[in-house]
Amino acid sequence: MEARAGGRGPSAVLARAAGAVYGVAMSALGLVVEPLQRLLGVKRMPWVFLLPNLLIFGVFVLFPVFLNAYVSLTGGTELFPRDRPFVGLENYRRLFDCLDLGDPNTCVEDRFWRAVRNTAQFVVLQVGGMVAISLLTALVLNRRIRFRAFFRSVYFYPVLLSPVVVALVWKWVLQRDGVLNALLVWVGLEPVNFLLDGRWAMAWVVIVSIWAHMGFYTLILLAGLQSIPAELYDAAAIDGAGGWRSFRNVTLPLLMPTMMVVLVLAVIRAVQTFDEVYVLTGGGPGTATMMIVQYIYQTGFATQVQRFGLAAAASVLLGLVLLVATLVQLRIGRGTEGHLA
């Protein structure tokens, strides 16, 4: 009460100090901005504020992209571009040097095509499974159930974990003498080499990835579901539509734009997957779970002869595939929105 009346309390002192600092900061900013505005004009001032962000984007995003594209056209084992001989499309020709593209054993770079095949298989299974489970979970969490806020937190919690931590936890569960095999032995079954059998390893890589990331996509789909007006469901109920018809004719069409965002993000994340799989299986057994990003890493940095040009060529191809896939998905999404309009 004393502080409000006399303005001498600690909060009043802090408010006056903050006001003084704000005034000094604005005066200092005005000394720089006002001459620039007189020099450039009001219409060009937005570029002044965008310039720092554009510089950071150019230095840390555009420049590495162009540098990587140039390195993909060079050969040798030297690191710096000035020391690397220009070889044109030789690295790309090596990647595509196959008698039969469907059989990696006939390719010069057979590990590249095994990684491509593994990545394609992983993307189909992981994205398809994750979108389906995330949608089902979002539909359940959108209903008025008990402990709804608690379950939302539980499903989102794995997203907060480091991918390395996720992989180490599941490795502890799935290894030969891990928790899951202990349970199997306890019920009288034989232990299974989950991480040493190729089919089991790929299946668990997909399951672990879905478990780790579905909370993020569930949250996006839940936001999409909550944006659908309740009046539409009331109107559908008056017309005699049941639960399935309301989902098919109301929920799914109106949720499609959100689904396209989820699909684009999920596909990009799945194609770029590396850390979880690398820690969980190391790409094995053999090359059964080696993804394309792991191939790029090992070709460029983890082998005795570091082939930077070949790794850069593979990364350029990966970027082009992602770009085309994203454009196709966005095109399909716009077509769906136009159909709804």
Image (spheres, rainbow, N blue to C red):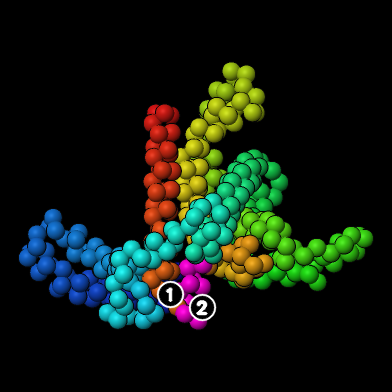
Residue 40 location (% of width, % of height): 9, 62
Q: Residue at x 38, y 71 (%)?
A: 309
| Residue type at the position of mark 2 | Thr
- Within 10 Å of disc 2 (Cα), the crowding (few <14, some 14-19, many 20+) is few
Left or right position of 123 against 194: left
Q: Nearer the viewer, residue 235 or 281?
A: 281
Residue 252 location (% of width, % of height): 54, 34
Residue 33 location (% of width, % of height): 16, 68
From which residue to which does the magenta span run?
295-305
Q: Quadrant of residue 41?
A: bottom left
Q: Which residue is mark 1?
A: 307
Residue 317 location (% of width, % of height): 41, 58
Left or right position of 221 against 188: left
Disc count in the image?
2
Left or right position of 340 against 211: left
115 shown above or below 297:
above
Q: Nearer the viewer, residue 296 or 237?
A: 296
Q: Quadrant of the N terminus?
A: bottom left
Q: Quadrant of the C terminus?
A: top left
Q: Nearer the viewer, residue 313 or 243?
A: 313
- Secondary structure under the numbered disc 1 in the rendered image: loop
Q: Are marks 1 and 2 in contact (CB under 8 Å)?
A: yes
| Residue type at the position of mark 1 | Arg
Q: Residue at x 20, y 59 (%)?
A: 46
Label of residue 303 in the image: 2
306 shown above or below 49:
below
Q: Quadrant of residue 332?
A: top left
Taking the magenta stretch, the answer to whether it contains residue 301 is: yes
